[in-house]
Image (cartoon, rainbow, N blue to C red):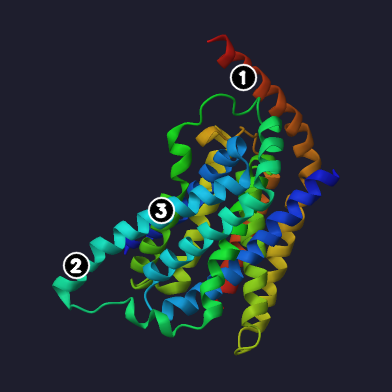
């Protein structure tokens, strides 16, 4: 129970980080373009992640490997390294839809719906080598609350 | 219009698939390395896109976008540091609590922080925003309550992983 709550707080905190990061990045985008700003952020983020790996990486790495040996034994499939590609595509697609009749709020709302739908599919079918999870009614309630709440905030 | 709606939905899929793939990589390499690979690959991919874009731009107008970058305040360069932390945390948490719950919690945190960050600005729709916050808090609370159910699923998961790895070893 304690372990689960810890993950829960971490994920919530990650969302806060994301909001602050988008705020900072959009400042940089004002001086260039969304793609250039994202490129710079990826470069700086790569350096930061490399630094983190050097400081704590080697120790944590072995622990993580030991923990997940059962789950991810053997060679890592090559597509596992390509998570950065759809992540980077996001900026380009957002630039298209934000400048369409959808505008910023419409794009944001639909992106959230897309994320949640994709999350449901991944959990249910265990896509991308993620552990499969049975879906409960509560998951539908959680999704509806989040989507409608986010929609109200975005459009108000 | 329908095409743009599809693109925006697809974009949500892009965000989510990036997080899932990084989470899967983190299961093998640890979350920090997953974050490192994510940023390196994204950096290279965007560099390619920018090269392509530069070709199109020089054909269309000839304007460069990199020149004014030096005028940006120093703090605005540090967004990437937060991004590195974000991907690491995300990759750590996602295989443990599932894609949907991670997504809901990240969106919740993002929206709550967004409302607070914007609170200094106009306060016209503040009542609506508070209603939205209430709904999100409820969603986040519901997802927390389902953690007891997920402990059972957690055990299922370990069994499944064991049987899966047994199957691969047998092959």
Q: Residue furthest front?
A: A54
N-terminal of the pair, mark 1 or mark 2, is: 2
Q: Which mark is residue B2?
A: none
Instruction: Provide the chain ID for the residue under circle 1.
Output: B
Q: Secondary structure at mark 1?
A: helix
Q: Residues within 10 Å of mark 2 (few under 14, many from 20)?
A: few
Q: Gap between marks 1 and 2, in whole Å?
A: 49 Å
Toward which corner of the image does residue A1 lie, by quadrant?
A: top right
**Is A82 positioned to the left or the right of A10 in the image?**
left
- Mark 2 or 3: in front is 2
Q: Residue furthest right?
A: A2
Question: x, y (%) of residue B22?
Answer: 54, 45
Question: x, y (%) of residue B58?
Answer: 17, 73
Do circles 1 and 2 both sit on a common chain? yes
Rendered view: B18 above or below B139: above
Q: Secondary structure at mark 2?
A: helix
Q: Secondary structure at mark 3?
A: helix
Task: Kindly identify the residue that appears in the image at 64 percent across and 79 percent down.
Answer: B117
Residue B168 visible in rendering: yes
Task: Kindly identify the residue that appears in the image at 65 percent across and 88 percent down.
Answer: B120
Q: Gap between marks 3 and 1, in whole Å?
A: 33 Å
Do circles 2 and 3 both sit on a common chain? yes
**Is B133 positioned to the left or the right of A47 in the image?**
right
Task: Please give the residue where the numbered disc 3 appears in the rendered image.
Answer: B10
User: In the rendered view of the protein, which quadrant contains the C terminus of chain A?
Assistant: bottom right
Residue A145 visible in rendering: no
Toward which corner of the image does residue B166 lie, by quadrant?
A: top right
Task: Kindly identify the residue that appears in the image at 37 percent across and 61 percent down.
Answer: A93
Task: Please give the residue where the numbered disc 2 appears in the rendered image.
Answer: B56
**Is B164 positioned to the left or the right of A96 in the image?**
right
N-terminal of the pair, mark 2 or mark 3, is: 3
Q: Which mark is residue B165?
A: 1
């Amino acid at each position: 129970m304690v372990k689960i709550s810890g993950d829960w707080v971490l994920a919530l905190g990650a969302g806060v980080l994301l909001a602050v990061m988008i705020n900072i990045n959009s400042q940089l985008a004002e001086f260039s373009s969304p793609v250039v700003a994202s490129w710079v952020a990826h470069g700086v983020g790569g350096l930061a992640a490399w630094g983190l790996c050097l400081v704590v990486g080697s120790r944590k790495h072995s622990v993580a490997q030991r923990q997940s040996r059962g789950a991810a034994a053997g060679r890592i499939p090559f597509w596992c390294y390509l998570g950065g590609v759809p992540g980077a595509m996001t900026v380009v697609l957002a630039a298209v839809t934000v400048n369409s009749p959808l505008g910023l709020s419409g794009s944001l709302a639909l992106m959230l719906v897309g994320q949640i739908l994709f999350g449901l599919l991944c959990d249910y079918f265990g896509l991308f080598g993620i552990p499969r999870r049975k879906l409960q009614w509560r998951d539908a309630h959680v999704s509806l609350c989040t989507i409608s709440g986010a929609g109200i905030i975005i459009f108000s | 219009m329908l095409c743009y709606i599809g693109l925006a939905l697809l974009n949500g899929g892009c965000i989510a698939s990036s997080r899932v793939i990084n989470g899967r990589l983190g299961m093998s390499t640890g979350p920090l390395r997953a974050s490192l690979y994510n940023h390196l690959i994204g950096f290279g991919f965007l560099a390619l896109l920018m090269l392509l874009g530069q070709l199109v731009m020089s054909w269309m107008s000839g304007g460069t976008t990199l020149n004014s970058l030096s005028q940006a305040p120093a703090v605005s360069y540090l967004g990437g540091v937060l991004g590195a932390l974000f991907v690491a945390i995300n990759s750590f948490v996602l295989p443990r609590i599932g894609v949907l719950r991670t997504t809901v919690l990240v969106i919740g945190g993002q929206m709550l922080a967004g409302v607070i960050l914007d609170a200094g600005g106009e306060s016209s729709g503040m009542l609506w925003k508070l209603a939205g916050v209430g709904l999100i808090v409820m969603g986040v609370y519901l997802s927390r309550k389902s953690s007891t159910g997920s402990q059972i699923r957690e055990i299922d998961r370990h069994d499944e992983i064991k049987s899966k790895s047994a199957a691969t070893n047998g092959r």
